[in-house]
Amino acid sequence: MEQVKEIYEKYDGEYNRLIRHRMEFYINLRYINENIPGKNLRILDLGGGVGRYSVALTKEGHEVTLIDLSEKNLEEAHRLCREEGVNIYRMELGNALDLSSIKDDSFDIVLAMGPFYHIKEESLRIQCINEIKRVLKNDGKLFSAHLSKCAFFKYIAKAMPEDIDKYYDNLHHIIDTGIKKYSDGDIFTDNTYCENSENILEFMGEHSFSEGQVIASEGLVDNIEDNLQELKDEYFEKIAELNYRFCKDPHAVNAASHLLYKGVNKK
Ligand SMILES: C[S@@+](CC[C@H](N)C(=O)[O-])C[C@H]1O[C@@H](n2cnc3c(N)ncnc32)[C@H](O)[C@@H]1O
């Protein structure tokens, strides 16, 4: 996990990432809110980063605990709270692989929108899901974020197609296995695990999560979302509302870069 920490300690773009990727934030948050059963719930935001989801859910009246590996992101979460005038119930450093400071059955909802795509070893993904199952109540809901197997291919094809020789073997390996074959010096993709919706549903099903669903976090617009960054809210909201209608479509899910899973914990 030291390298994952290092990624976020060095990266300066995390504070405003969900401002830049406003469609991802819109779709994920709307889907979470629509699938949360009621008010005043106890929510764990595991790998909550700078706290954009924690702040939004606190504003909805929930009691949110944010845990993250990165000191820098936690400091940024405090900054976001000051800027938004919001008090997140609890924020602390921690690792999703060891939640021993938290009692069993503590939460109604767990968001894990950071850990899974940074865990390359299956045994550690199992350790992580077992910790989540333990702290999540029976019938509690999990929302987890995943990077898709086509995410880096789409990125390279768009941003650096003339460098394809450098990435060619690794892109094949990611499509086949979810991870790179060898390091190409990029610390983010060196420490990333990619999946597709079938892998995610199978893994979660094996760990007794029911009612699984995977959505496309950007709907249909991930490769054109640069056009939406500066768009006036009145236009953005209509495009987002239309786009939301596609996020559960299996064709959109199979072609998406970012995936959001929802499932119900059965103990
Ligand atoms: C790309 S950020 C996403 C943050 C936030 N969940 C969001 O969706 O905006 C990934 C976050 O997950 C955290 N993270 C990754 N692996 C983790 C782990 N094993 N335990 C706790 N935090 C972890 C990182 O430190 C980082 O803040």
Image (tube, rainbow, N blue to C red):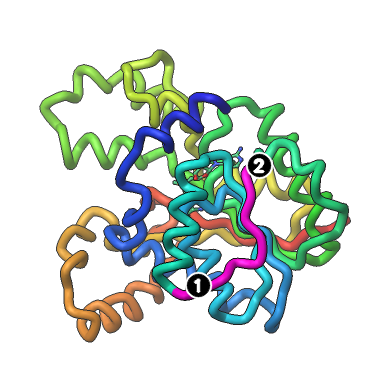
Where does label 2 land, which residue?
94
Task: Look at the image and tell me whether residue 230 can be seen.
Answer: yes
- Residue appearing at x 54%, y 78% in the figure: 59
Q: Whole-percent x and y of residue 205?
A: 73, 49
Circle 2: residue type: Gly
- Residue appearing at x 15%, y 32% in the figure: 161
Q: Depth check: 97 or 195 in front?
A: 97
- Magenta range is 85-93
> Considering only vertical position in the picture, is 196 above or below 252?
above
For this orientation, the residue located farthest to the left is 162
Q: Residues within 10 Å of mark 1 (few under 14, many from 20)?
A: some
Label 2, ligand 1: CB separation under 8 Å? yes
Q: Depth check: 154 or 45 in front?
A: 45
Q: Residues within 10 Å of mark 2 (few under 14, many from 20)?
A: some
- Residue appearing at x 36%, y 53% in the figure: 15
> Considering only vertical position in the picture, is 188 above or below 73?
above
Where does label 1 land, which residue?
56
Cα–Cα gap, marks 1 and 2: 21 Å
* The image quarter in which residue 121 lies: top right
Task: Look at the image and tell me whether residue 211 can be seen.
Answer: no
Circle 1: residue type: Ala
Horizontal side, residue 254 vs residue 204: left or right: left
* The image quarter in which residue 18 lies: bottom left
Q: Whole-percent x and y of residue 192?
A: 47, 32
Horizontal side, residue 263 vs residue 218: left or right: right
For this orientation, the residue located farthest to the top is 182
